[in-house]
Amino acid sequence: MGLSTSENSNEELAIEVDIPSGVTADFGDNMLSIQGKLGTIKKDITKLPVDIMIKGNRVVIRPYGSRKKDRAISNTCK
């Protein structure tokens, strides 16, 4: 699982998490679902102040704010 920080200045706090082969990710209704050969895990992110998107084979986690606390929250989500 590789991690990288987005280079765009508007999204400098965005964290991208690579999805390994054989694993699928789905996001809808504030529920992140990851399914692999060992089973499925679902996480409700309703109370986390982050925006989660799935782009290709990456999960992008972007906090709402730009403070140090917001960066810590996005690191906790990964």
Image (cartoon, rainbow, N blue to C red):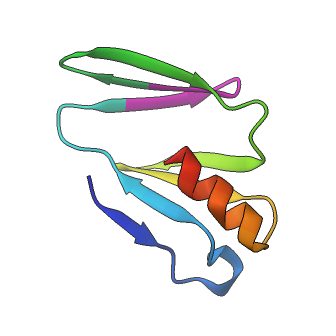
The image quadrant that residue 21 belongs to is top left
The location of residue 52, given as percent across then percent down, is 62, 46
Q: Position of residue 73 (x, y in %)?
A: 67, 54
Indicate left or right for 21 with 67 as reference.
Answer: left
Q: Is residue 78 magenta?
A: no
Residue at image coords 40%, 70%: 4
Count of labels shown? 0
Classify residue 37 by image quadrant.
Answer: top left
Instruction: State the residue in front, 65 or 24.
Output: 65
Foreground residue, 66 or 24? 66
Q: Position of residue 18 (x, y in %)?
A: 33, 53
Find the residue positioned furthest to the top.
39
In percent of the image, x 74 and y 62: which residue is there?
70
Q: Residue at x 70, y 23 (%)?
A: 29
Side of 75 where 68 appears, left or right: right
Classified by dominant secondary structure, the portion drawn in magenta counts as strand
Q: Which residues are magenta?
A: 25-33
Percent coordinates x, y for residue 49 in the rendering: 78, 47
Q: In the picture shown, does residue 5 fall above or below 72?
A: below
* 77 relative position to 47: left or right: left
Q: Is residue 44 left or right of residue 64?
A: left
